[in-house]
Image (cartoon, rainbow, N blue to C red):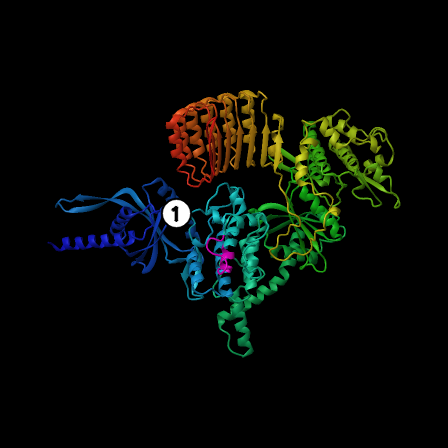
């Protein structure tokens, strides 16, 4: 036997032994088993000879991880393998490639696992050369994808288990672990990357010379980038045990990572109390509903880590602040110098820790009259320079901001509340320190009560917002304004995102900050601009007038009186050729009791030019002024007069309106001989509203009801909105303190609610779903004979409503046919957010083709968790059952499935295909099938049962197979 032959035998024996040792440790669930491992060892020893000393580390469903030594770089590494020969493997490779690219971006961070390289192992062939010797040929076929990364032999889950069995860590060590986890997550978040699978398994524990360990984030396979235009993802990815409430509903946001982290932090902080399976249905339900956090366990609720976890576990994602804020807060609470360097954040108001240590050392050297090293002296000088700069920076910023503001805007601050540098600089300092905003502010306006700035909010992916800052004189008035705005949740009104108090930087004065929706300009500014160029067309003016009436009528539905209607208090949003008008500024508004029509007070409130006669004519201090919805209506009428006659009325608007109002009149503007247009659609409204006697004046609700097709705020349609959002006047509830808030605490005084449900019974009302952002929609057109054309229109309307999460359609007895079912399915397919879909399509003659197209549409709705289809008497047959089942099988998230297919003649083949497709829905827990009168026979029943048997998670099963035979299994 030759030397080469002996060497080959030894190599083969080595490979065989290596495969045996490793394969014995690979779980059965892993796709790569002994045969695949044998191939890996063969290929890597031939193609990557610098990798040696392989040992088993871990594995997942599709990946295998081996420990190895890279002799070229002299380092121990982890190698992650995925096969290229299966569909699942190819998907995993794309995920792994993304993970590699992301981790490469963060290679400077000590708290994300390092990746060194990635490569393919190619398939090999053996050929004979000229001398008849075997020669290995590398082909173009890819066999395995490999990622070479830093070796960390233990994850946080394993560390938790070890600590439970041995010795629990000190509070200091637990806080260090928490800080390192937050640092790793913040490193991702500041780059707008959300991890989407935060759990103990995905933090690795690496040896370190500081605390003995370093915690590193790994497994970025599900990670996704968020942008201004895409702030969330409509899919459930990750581990459901650690899902945030919004992820459970199908929306993954960057704040969702914080919720998952909160659960991990709780376990870390209470290892002696919380076992590895502590997160159950009851725990999550309690947290989701805001009723408490792990109340059945005796956990430490006074620790620093709990304070952070409590913020992470807020049910509303908007209340969870940011990973950077949480990191900064925990470092402050920890209160001890860290032995490692953070790279994800530098606080503007803090001197970096390393520099501070040098600063302290220099002071010590100076005190002892010792020589200061040159480099240290340079840093010392730089620190002093930064400290001096800090003292004046906010004053400089305030001055620059004022210098860049139009003098006409500055003149509006008559009381000089905000145009003083010393006041504005204090406010800017507070806004900078909060780190909520991109530090680029612009002054938009001043008013009698405050100032308005534009900026971008970091938490909203740098979305442009407006900050209205107002000095607090009367807290009750501020509470009233907040309460009113939080009830008004449609596009007709400017939206309030958040509110909070500034007081530390401005003591003893206190200021309230309103975070508001950004619009293009005020209606007053819009009219001024347009007036310079041209007069608006009658159509353009009517569009604005309708929206003005709509918005004020909308607030009247809540028994809210605005009391300061004027062009400055309507904002215009311009988007291409689209113009939206929104009512704003509710500082003077009041909400009446439900059975109250008016209030009478001695004070005169609002802009005199737009006041109603029952207010303006009572100009003596002892005369009561009457405020009601009709006083708002009069103000709206005057505003419409200016809108329709801007070029004639713009010069002396205030004087003209006041003089007319103070002198009783029969017809608006006629007595004063003022030339206004009297032949327009808007004048018809003016005649009803600009009426001197209050009792004869029309209410806005009457105008809206008489012209219901033009307006969105129809009284009947508003009832559902009011029932969900009406809070009533503030004096009817316990006063809410909006005073100073501690760091990290949510700054919403009253939770902002969302409009949820609407019932539609007319085709022409479909637009309201989109306009009012309804999520839960019920459409009832049963027995209306809408036919195929009606179904097409319905599908087109539904397709515009991307916000729908729950859709219920009652369409029984409408004869929509196959074409109608197709168009309906096409419309439903556009609603990507749907999680619950209920279709009542009995007796519609949709047939096999209709069932197929309906199934195709449903298949596009990947987020559906509950699906109910009522298809009695539709004659879909075996082919229809097959195609419908194929569509359903694409909805991987379904947990509840109810199919009512009575009298559809699906037969044995249809039952077989239906069973095969149901078998693919692995997450089903509740299944109800109504298949009476379908002639499925014994074979069909057998095949159906075989399919259902594959659904291992079913807890409730109801099968109706004959009229007299029901099988219940619970």
Figure quadrant of residue 708: top right
Measured along the vertical axis of the image, is residue 493 above or below residue 418?
Answer: above
Q: Quadrant of residue 723?
A: top right
Q: Relative to 222, is 667 on the left or the right?
A: right
Residue 805 picture location, percent across and down: 55, 37
- Total number of numbered labels? 1
- The N terminus, quarter of image: bottom left
Residue 266 magenta? yes
Residue sitting at x 58%, y 36%: 776
Whether residue 550 is visible here, answered yes or no, is yes
Could you tell me if residue 492 is visible in this image?
no
The residue positioned farthest toward the front in the image shown: 964
Name the residue carrying label 1. Answer: 96
Residue drawn at (54%, 62%), measured in percent from left and top? 331
- Describe the element under mark 1 as helix, strand or loop: helix
Dominant secondary structure (helix, strand or loop) of the stretch shown in magenta: loop
Front-lying residue, 404 or 803: 803
In x, y percent, where is residue 169?
47, 64
């Amino acid at each position: 036997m030759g030397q080469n032959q002996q060497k080959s035998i030894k190599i083969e024996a080595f490979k065989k032994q290596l495969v045996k040792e490793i394969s014995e440790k690979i779980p059965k669930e892993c796709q790569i088993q002994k045969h695949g491992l044998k191939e890996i060892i063969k290929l890597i020893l031939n193609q990557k000879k610098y990798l040696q000393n392989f040992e088993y580390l871990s594995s997942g469903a599709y990946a295998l991880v081996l420990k190895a030594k890279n002799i070229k770089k002299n380092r121990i590494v982890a190698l992650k393998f995925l096969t290229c020969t299966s569909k699942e493997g190819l998907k995993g490779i794309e995920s792994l490639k993304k993970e590699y690219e992301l981790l490469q971006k963060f290679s400077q961070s000590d708290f994300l696992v390092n990746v060194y390289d990635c490569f393919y192992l190619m398939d090999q062939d053996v050929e004979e050369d000229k001398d008849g010797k075997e020669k290995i040929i590398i082909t173009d076929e890819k066999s395995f994808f490999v990622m070479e990364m830093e070796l960390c032999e233990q994850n946080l889950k394993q560390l938790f288990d070890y600590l439970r069995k041995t010795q629990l860590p000190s509070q200091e060590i637990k806080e260090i672990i928490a800080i390192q986890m937050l640092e790793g997550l913040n490193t991702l978040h500041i780059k707008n990357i959300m991890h989407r699978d935060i759990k103990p398994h995905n933090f690795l524990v690496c040896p370190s010379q500081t605390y003995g360990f370093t915690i590193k984030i790994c497994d970025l396979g599900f990670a996704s980038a968020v942008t201004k235009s895409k702030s969330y993802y409509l899919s459930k990815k990750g581990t459901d045990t650690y899902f945030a409430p919004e992820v459970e509903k199908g929306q993954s946001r960057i704040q969702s990572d914080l919720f998952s982290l909160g659960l991990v932090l709780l376990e870390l902080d209470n290892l002696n109390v919380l076992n590895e399976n502590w997160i159950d249905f009851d725990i999550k339900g309690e947290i989701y509903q805001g009723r408490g956090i792990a109340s059945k366990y005796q956990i430490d609720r006074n620790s620093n880590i709990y304070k952070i976890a409590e913020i992470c576990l807020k049910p509303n994602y908007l209340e969870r602040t940011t990973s950077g804020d949480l990191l900064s807060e925990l470092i402050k609470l920890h209160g001890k110098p860290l032995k490692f360097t953070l790279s994800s954040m530098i606080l503007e108001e803090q001197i970096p820790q390393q520099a501070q240590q040098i600063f302290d050392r220099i002071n010590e050297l100076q005190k002892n009259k010792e020589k200061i090293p040159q480099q240290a002296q340079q840093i010392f000088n730089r620190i002093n320079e930064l400290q001096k700069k800090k003292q004046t920076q906010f004053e400089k910023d305030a001055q620059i901001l004022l210098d860049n503001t139009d003098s006409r805007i500055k003149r509006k601050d008559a009381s000089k509340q905000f145009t003083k540098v010393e006041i504005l600089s204090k406010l800017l300092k507070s806004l900078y320190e909060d780190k909520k905003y991109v530090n680029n502010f612009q002054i938009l306006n001043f008013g009698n009560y405050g100032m308005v700035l534009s900026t971008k909010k970091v938490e909203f992916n740098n979305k442009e917002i407006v900050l209205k800052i107002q000095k607090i004189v009367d807290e009750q008035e501020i509470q009233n304004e907040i309460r009113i705005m939080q009830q008004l949740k449609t596009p007709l009104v400017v939206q309030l995102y958040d509110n909070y108090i500034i007081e530390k930087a401005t003591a003893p004065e206190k200021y309230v900050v309103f975070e508001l929706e950004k619009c293009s300009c005020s209606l007053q500014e819009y009219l001024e601009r347009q007036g310079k160029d041209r007069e608006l067309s009658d159509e353009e003016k009517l569009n604005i007038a309708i929206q003005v009436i709509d918005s004020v009528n909308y607030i009247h539905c809540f028994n809210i009186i605005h009391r300061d209607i004027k062009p400055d208090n309507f904002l215009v949003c311009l988007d291409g050729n689209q113009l939206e008008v929104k009512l704003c500024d509710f500082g003077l508004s009041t909400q009446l009791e439900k059975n109250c029509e008016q209030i009478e007070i001695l004070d005169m409130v609002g802009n005199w030019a737009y006041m109603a006669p029952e207010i303006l004519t009572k100009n003596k201090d002892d005369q009561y002024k009457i405020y009601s919805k009709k006083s708002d209506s009069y103000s709206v009428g005057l505003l419409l007069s200016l809108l329709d006659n801007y070029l004639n009325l713009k010069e002396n608007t205030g004087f003209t309106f006041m003089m007319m109002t103070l002198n009783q009149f029969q017809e608006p503007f006629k007595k004063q001989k003022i030339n206004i247009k009297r032949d327009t659609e808007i004048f018809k409204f003016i005649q009803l509203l600009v009426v001197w006697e209050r009792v004869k004046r029309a209410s806005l609700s009457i105008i809206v009801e008489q012209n219901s097709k033009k307006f969105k705020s129809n009284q009947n349609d508003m009832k559902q909105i009011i029932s969900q959002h009406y809070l009533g006047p503030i004096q009817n509830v316990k006063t809410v303190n909006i005073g100073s808030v501690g760091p990290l605490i949510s700054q919403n005084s009253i939770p902002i609610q969302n409009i949820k449900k609407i019932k539609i019974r007319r085709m022409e009302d479909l637009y309201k779903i989109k306009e009012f952002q309804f999520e839960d929609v019920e459409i009832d057109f049963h027995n209306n004979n809408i036919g195929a054309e009606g179904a097409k229109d319905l599908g087109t309307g539904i397709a515009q409503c991307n916000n729908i999460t729950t859709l219920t359609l009652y369409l029984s007895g409408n004869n929509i046919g196959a074409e109608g079912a197709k168009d309906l399915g096409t419309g439903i397919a556009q609603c990507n957010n749907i999680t619950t879909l209920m279709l009542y399509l009995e007796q519609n003659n949709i047939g096999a083709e209709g069932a197929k197209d309906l199934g195709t549409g449903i298949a596009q709705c990947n987020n559906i968790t509950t699906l109910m289809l009522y298809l009695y008497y539709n004659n879909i047959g075996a082919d229809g059952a097959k195609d419908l089942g194929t569509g359903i099988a694409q909805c991987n998230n379904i947990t509840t499935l109810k199919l009512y297919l009575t009298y559809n003649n699906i037969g044995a083949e249809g039952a077989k295909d239906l069973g095969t497709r149901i078998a693919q829905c692995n997450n089903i827990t509740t299944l109800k099938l109504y298949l009476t009168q379908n002639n499925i026979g014994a074979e069909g029943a057998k095949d159906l049962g075989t399919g259902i048997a594959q659904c291992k998670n079913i807890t409730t099963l109801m099968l109706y197979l004959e009229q007299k035979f029901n099988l219940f299994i619970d």
